[in-house]
Image: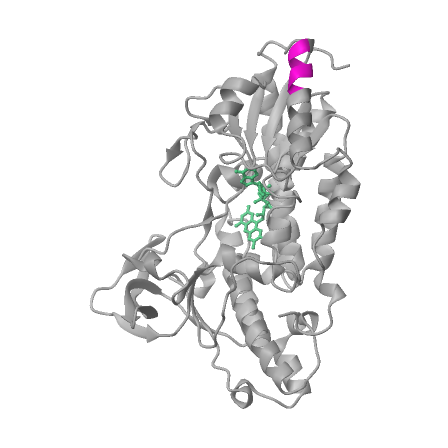
Amino acid sequence: MPQPGHFVAIIGGAVSGAEAAFQLSKRGITSVVIDQYALPYGKIEDGLPKWHIKLRNQEEAKIDEKLTNPFVHFLPNTRLGRDVSFQELIEEWGVSAVLLATGAWRDRPLPVEGIDAFIGKGLYYQNPLIYWFNHCHEPTFHGPHFELTDGAIVVGGGLASLDVMKVLMMDQVGKALEARGIQGDIFTLDRSIQAVLEANNLTLDDLGIKPPTLFYRRGVEDMPLSPFPPTTPEKLEKAKKVRRKILNNYQRKYLFEVETYQVPVDKIVENGRLAGLTFQQTRVEDGKVIPIPGTEKSFRSPLVISSIGSIPEQINGIPLAGQVFNIADPETCRIEGFPHVFALGNAVTGRGNINESLRHGREISHAVITEYFDEREEMYRETFRTTENSVKEHLTKVVDQLSHSPLLTQEKMEALSLRVKNLQQKVGYDGDYETWVKNHLPMRLEELIGFGH
Ligand SMILES: Cc1cc2nc3c(=O)[nH]c(=O)nc-3n(C[C@H](O)[C@H](O)[C@H](O)COP(=O)(O)OP(=O)(O)OC[C@H]3O[C@@H](n4cnc5c(N)ncnc54)[C@H](O)[C@@H]3O)c2cc1C
């Protein structure tokens, strides 16, 4: 029998949502974690490239532990804005608070006029591409197919854009090796494509593969390849060296090209398809990127991939400030106009709550990354930990706000539990989280033999 208390709706069950539910449960607060998909793993399942199986399994186990807590209800396959409206959640449910832990799944638009008309006709964005790549080997995958080619143009510069370069090379080299009857798998390619080619006495030329090129608007030493911005001149100098080393390592192992100080300014269109981009050279002054007029140059390719960052997806009824949620109070990340609605984790800015974490002494993590940069998995592990820590700190403030609100009555708590139970029944979830997850885990890459296409 529920007691009077607080009942919080958390939208999104991944790193941020699960940590929020866990923090609330430690304070005896009941929550319902609502996720649009059957599995609550977010970026871990759909954004972290699929060769990171050890990290994926470890992070997903953490989420499982947090969501199998007596204070936490899980409601899968339910999307805010489609199955439950934001208005309904606020006006009809009557929960104590709503926490938006919906992440950042919308690609920042490539700033070339009219270019989005060519999505699927020579242009792909990073988020759906990685989603496809992570799932395309599953027999039950029926989502859109992505056709990759060699010689692609990738616009980007951060960690995620390096993943795109690897995906392109793995796809092209894997297919070419398979066509020659050479056995292998993605995990060997992940260690080093160059080493695989050497072991087979082959070069990219032998395979007829033109490498893709990464176009970045600043210099190599400016690339945001670690998630922690350096805070002192000494750390900046060290970070610059590390960035160059990371990129050199990646290029040596995965054989792609890089063009720096270039911004896209126009598109090349042929026969109704995107056939390349025109770039303008830049210089960086006081940290600002300044395009240099008269330096335009055309680069042709049948495939352009944009990997310039992610922002939160819009949800009907939630106000925006530009491309992100309209945050009224930076301390609690409360949404403008709604006293009990807060954003968490990547949903705040698309970049996690890094500054807040830094303020709370997480700078040590930067040292960890710069010392161990060669262990690529560590970089992602660190970003997950940073998000988790920022949510933990953030929840203290949210709970402080909650403590000023009256407790919900026993009847109200019961009514909310019943509402959630009805919705769980509607999607076929009987409350047995462990069995549900086991039944919905997709086929894993490690169960396959071959390059996984
Ligand atoms: C390639 C890559 C790059 C990264 N880059 C950075 C970076 O630059 N900075 C950084 O801090 N971290 C970065 N990370 C780390 C990572 O994104 C975060 O640490 C963390 O995973 C974000 O967790 P989250 O729970 O906030 O969001 P997500 O993992 O995105 O989870 C959001 C959840 O909400 C659900 N959801 C979304 N919309 C709805 C809806 N309308 N209704 C119901 N459910 C919904 C989704 O299904 C998902 O499960 C990166 C990770 C990867 C894999």
Residue located 64% across and 90% down the image: 201
Q: Foreground residue, 396 or 246?
A: 396
Position in image of residue 409 (x %, y %) = 66, 9
Tell me, yes or no, whether the highlighted magenta stretch contains residue 101. no
Asked whether, in this view, residue 115 is left or right of residue 17, the answer is: left
Asked whether, in this view, residue 317 is left or right of residue 371, the answer is: left
Where the N terminus falls, by quadrant?
A: top right
Where the C terminus falls, by quadrant?
A: bottom right
Q: Foreground residue, 293 or 348?
A: 348
Q: Give the range drawn in magenta.
A: 411-416
Position in image of residue 404 (x %, y %) = 58, 11
Q: Foreground residue, 8 or 147?
A: 147
| Res 361 seen here | no
Position in image of residue 78 (x %, y %) = 59, 36
Q: Quadrant of ligand 1?
A: top right
| Res 172 seen here | yes
Position in image of residue 206 (x %, y %) = 55, 90
Q: In this view, does 378 lie above or below 333?
A: below
Residue located 47% across and 24% down the image: 87
